[in-house]
Amino acid sequence: MLDIFRGLKNLIKVSHIHIDSSVFRLHYSITVMILLAFSLIVTTRQYVGNPIDCIHTKDIPEDVLNTYCWIHSTYTIHSAHLKKVGFEVPHPGVDRAPRDEADKKYVKYYQWVCFCLFFQADSG
């Protein structure tokens, strides 16, 4: 895992001429390195794990369904959180599709976080 961060040490440059305060130098050097490090951590599936893992059957290939779940949002059902797990519902928030659309709470995966961290570090 440390091999990922070795490229970040090239961002550290020691200059003997200072035209700004030490707090500002700390901000634009360390903050950029932290943002790039977290961007790398989020994008490497090897160390963080699968970002999303959908429940699937053998009818649909796992990679296809995980890609679909990565792109599209899913939802939980508010009334299913109040039911007894294992008897009325298989998992908290999972139940048959409700007729009332207001009973659904949509959940989207944050697949753009790594890009936002990178672009924020790039603008720093």
Image: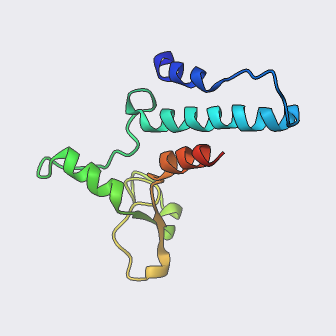
Please tell me which residue lies in front, 59 or 123.
123
Q: Is residue 58 above or below residue 106?
A: above
Position of the C terminus by quadrant: top right
Q: Is residue 23 left or right of residue 69?
A: right
Q: Is residue 20 left or right of residue 44?
A: right
- Tell me residue 11's x, y (percent): 61, 27
Q: Is residue 24 left or right of residue 98?
A: right
Residue 46, quarter of the rendered image: top left
Q: Residue at x 27, y 52 (%)?
A: 67
Q: Is residue 15 above or below residue 43?
A: above
Please tell me which residue lies in front, 22 or 20.
20
Q: Residue at x 53, y 22 (%)?
A: 5
Please tell me which residue lies in front, 4 or 49.
4
Way the structure is coloured: rainbow
| Label tally | 0
Q: Residue at x 68, y 23 (%)?
A: 13
Q: Is residue 90 above or below residue 7?
A: below
- In the picture as drawn, the residue positioned furthest to the right comes out as 21
- In the picture as drawn, the residue positioned furthest to the left comes out as 59
- In the picture as drawn, the residue positioned furthest to the bottom comes out as 100
Q: Is residue 110 above or below residue 33?
A: below
- Tell me residue 26's x, y (percent): 78, 32
Residue 36, quarter of the rendered image: top right
- Tell me residue 25's x, y (percent): 79, 34
